[in-house]
Image (cartoon, helix red, strand yellow):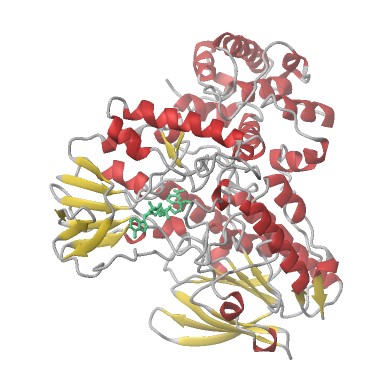
């Protein structure tokens, strides 16, 4: 079939075929536009999304058929009428459709967020416009890091007419999507949500596309917004010192040849990421292995793994992506598991988006925007979060943190056991002894456990005692010989902004101030460090939900709000008040303590060396959106 046809010239049969794979609640939203009425939404085709339900939209097959027939008739009528322009639905119709699409009501107070996220007419309400006349002459911002957040910062500054320099230590823009090239690397957030609100892509080749596709997306966005013209690559920031007399940051750079330069900036936005300093495990003898060895984030593609005896250490999100991708090449593979991960079933995890679906995204009126909105509602608002909150005197610890969490545990354990089948020992080894949500769950379509069940793959659960020249010695005394050891051992997530030295007001050193326990107000600003802003800073990571891009967009709106406030009020610097930041972080700690990831029985990259949850945001997406919408002048010391 020719899927380049548009609605104008597609046949009834082909249209029917396209709709057979369309997402039904989204199709109903398109029907609302076509009919200019919410009447079709008021009948018996009513989605109801619950995270624990097997069917994502909660509709019966009969209801789906009925919806498809209604939509087919309406689209044929639209086509036969020559595809006239559709009237813009009024606010009440949009709200009713927003309420309809997941079948779960949302409170009135969330309406503004919902409208912003739906972005029906491409309004981009997260953009902050600045009166360029108010921008002081020579005002220039340094953005450190050109990953997803850094590119966003660059674009927002550019849109506001603020001069900036974007630096990155790498030779390419792209951050994590440039650095992680391991086999099987793909995004583990729904891809139709994992894109900027102002640069939607509705033509993802897969529901969870591979890293090359993501890398190309970010490169493409950067190119369209001319970010490269402001970028200096192969350049590290080594230190940055706040000069109180000029209210500027004096920044030292070093390029890949070791040449150093210095420059001054009115403000610094650090978009350095949380997950980019590979962590090697603290195992005796780690340097003694004589074979090939590398970390997943620094994959050495030159090695042919065919027939090799390969050890993998770690079973987190990275390992569970690359192990299934390479298992068939290796001669024999042993996966060393210290603790198992919870698996979150996602059927379409490795599925391409079909031609039919791609056609719907391209052609059906407003279908793509409503699909993204459906994902946002289903994942971010009505998502798993309520299942991850704990109850104070719950007796189910350490296995669960609340009755709802126990319910989730039961469903997730059943999934693992079903996958493991008759192999009860494997099932027992794979069921975590900590609450669901304690660590980031691994998305799974069955590929993890089916890989572990392969004849050439062994799951080793005896702890690693030592790495030796020929391989690994486990605590049970066994010697395992290998040709290759691959470390899927994650990142030093809590090393925020390291190794850059930041010296703030009164000569205060940022890392000395933090003492290994990074804290910031809203994850964005730090007392004593005026005009310094962080993206994806402390306590801004999400465990489940929409995508981290949503958080970066909220953070960047807040930062732009700070700059705007500073310009409009003619302030030379803005610095968050110490007490405000402390109070905020006390509340973070209190709330994180009550979450599954705050359980004292869990250790993960969500916690820093002090055992404090320094990475995660404990609230809802709505709460973070609300608190970052606009800075409160009262939170700041202004000079
Ligand atoms: P990780 O989740 O921190 O996993 C590290 C693994 O190494 C864990 O299984 C850990 O075991 C194990 N490990 C660490 N030190 C060890 C030691 N001394 N001995 C034995 N095992 C050891 O790291 P990751 O898999 O790289 O994932 C990090 C985060 O990156 C993810 O949570 C996710 O947010 C993100 N990520 C995203 C994507 C994506 O979207 N495409 C892909 C990959 C990663 P324990 O659990 O017992 O500590």
In which quadrant of the rendered view does residue 562 lie?
bottom right
- Check the image and name the residue furthest to the bottom: 245
Q: Residue at x 75, y 73 (%)?
A: 578
User: Relative to 527, is 551 above or below?
Assistant: above
Compared across the picture, whether 471 is left or right of 74 comes to left
User: Relative to 135, is 111 above or below?
Assistant: above
Q: Residue at x 43, y 86 (%)?
A: 259
* x and y, in percent, of residue 547 in the image: 58, 46
Q: Residue at x 34, y 52 (%)?
A: 314
Q: Residue at x 21, y 52 (%)?
A: 476
Compared across the picture, whether 41 is left or right of 543 comes to right
Q: Quadrant of the N terminus?
A: top left
Please tell me which residue lies in front, 612 or 361: 612
User: Relative to 124, is 500 above or below?
Assistant: below
In which quadrant of the rendered view does residue 129 lie?
bottom right
Q: Quadrant of the C terminus?
A: bottom right
* x and y, in percent, of residue 150 in the image: 57, 63
């Amino acid at each position: 079939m020719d899927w380049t046809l548009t609605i104008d010239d597609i046949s009834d049969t082909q249209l029917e075929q396209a709709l057979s794979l369309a997402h039904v609640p989204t199709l109903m939203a398109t029907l609302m536009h076509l009919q200019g009425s919410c009447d079709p939404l008021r009948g018996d085709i009513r989605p109801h999304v619950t995270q624990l339900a097997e069917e994502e939209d909660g509709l019966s097959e009969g209801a789906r058929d009925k919806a498809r027939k209604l939509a087919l008739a309406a689209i044929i009528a639209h086509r036969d009428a020559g595809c006239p322009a559709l009237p813009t639905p009024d606010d009440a119709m949009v709200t009713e459709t927003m309420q309809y699409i997941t079948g779960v009501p949302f409170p009135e107070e969330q309406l503004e967020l919902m409208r912003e996220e739906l972005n029906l007419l491409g309004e981009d309400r997260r953009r902050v416009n600045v009166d360029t006349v108010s921008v002081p002459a020579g005002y220039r911002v340094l953005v450190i890091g050109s990953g997803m957040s850094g590119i966003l910062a660059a674009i927002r500054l550019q849109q506001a007419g603020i001069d900036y320099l974007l630096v990155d230590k790498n030779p390419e823009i792209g951050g994590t999507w440039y650095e992680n090239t391991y086999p099987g690397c793909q995004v583990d957030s729904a891809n139709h949500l994992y894109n900027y609100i102002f640069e939607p892509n509705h033509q993802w080749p897969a529901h969870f596309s591979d890293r090359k596709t993501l890398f190309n997306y970010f490169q493409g966005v950067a190119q369209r917004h001319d970010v490269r013209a402001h970028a200096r690559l192969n350049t590290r920031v080594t230190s940055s010192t706040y000069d109180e007399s000029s209210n500027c940051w004096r920044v030292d750079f070093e390029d890949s040849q070791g040449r150093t330069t210095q420059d001054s900036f009115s403000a610094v936005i650090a978009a350095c990421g949380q997950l980019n300093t590979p962590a090697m495990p603290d195992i005796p003898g780690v340097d003694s292995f004589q074979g090939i060895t590398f970390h997943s984030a620094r994959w050495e593609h030159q090695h042919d793994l065919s027939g090799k005896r390969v050890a993998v250490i770690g079973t987190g999100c990275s390992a569970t992506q690359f192990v299934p991708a390479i298992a068939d090449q290796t001669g024999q593979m042993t996966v060393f598991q210290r603790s198992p991960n919870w698996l979150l079933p996602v059927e379409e995890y490795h599925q391409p988006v079909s031609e039919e679906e791609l056609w719907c995204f391209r052609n059906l009126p407003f279908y793509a925007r409503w699909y993204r909105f459906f994902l946002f509602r289903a994942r971010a608002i009505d998502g798993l979060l309520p299942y991850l909150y704990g109850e104070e005197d719950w007796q189910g610890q350490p296995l669960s943190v609340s009755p709802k969490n126990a319910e989730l545990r039961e469903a997730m354990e059943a999934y693992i056991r079903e996958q493991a089948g008759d192999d009860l020992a494997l099932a027992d080894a794979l069921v975590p002894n900590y609450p669901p949500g304690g660590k980031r769950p691994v998305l799974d379509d069955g590929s993890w456990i089916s890989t572990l069940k392969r004849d050439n793959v062994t799951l080793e659960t005896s702890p690693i005692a030592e790495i030796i020249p020929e391989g690994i010695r486990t605590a049970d005394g066994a010697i395992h010989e290998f040709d290759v050891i691959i470390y899927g051992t994650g990142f030093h997530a809590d090393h925020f902004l390291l190794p850059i030295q930041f010296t703030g007001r009164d000569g205060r050193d940022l890392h000395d101030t933090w003492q290994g326990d990074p804290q910031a107000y809203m994850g964005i600003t730090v007392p004593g460090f005026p005009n310094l802003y962080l993206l994806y800073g402390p306590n801004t990571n999400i465990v489940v939900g929409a995508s981290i891009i949503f958080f970066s967009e909220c953070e960047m709106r807040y930062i732009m709000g700070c700059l705007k406030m500073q310009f409009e009020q003619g302030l030379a610097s803005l610095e968050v008040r110490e007490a405000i930041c402390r109070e905020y972080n006390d509340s973070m700690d209190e709330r994180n303590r009550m979450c599954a990831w705050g359980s004292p029985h869990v250790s993960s990259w969500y916690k820093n060396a002090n055992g404090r949850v320094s990475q995660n945001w404990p609230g809802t997406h709505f709460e973070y959106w609300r608190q970052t919408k606009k800075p409160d002048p009262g939170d700041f010391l202004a000079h």
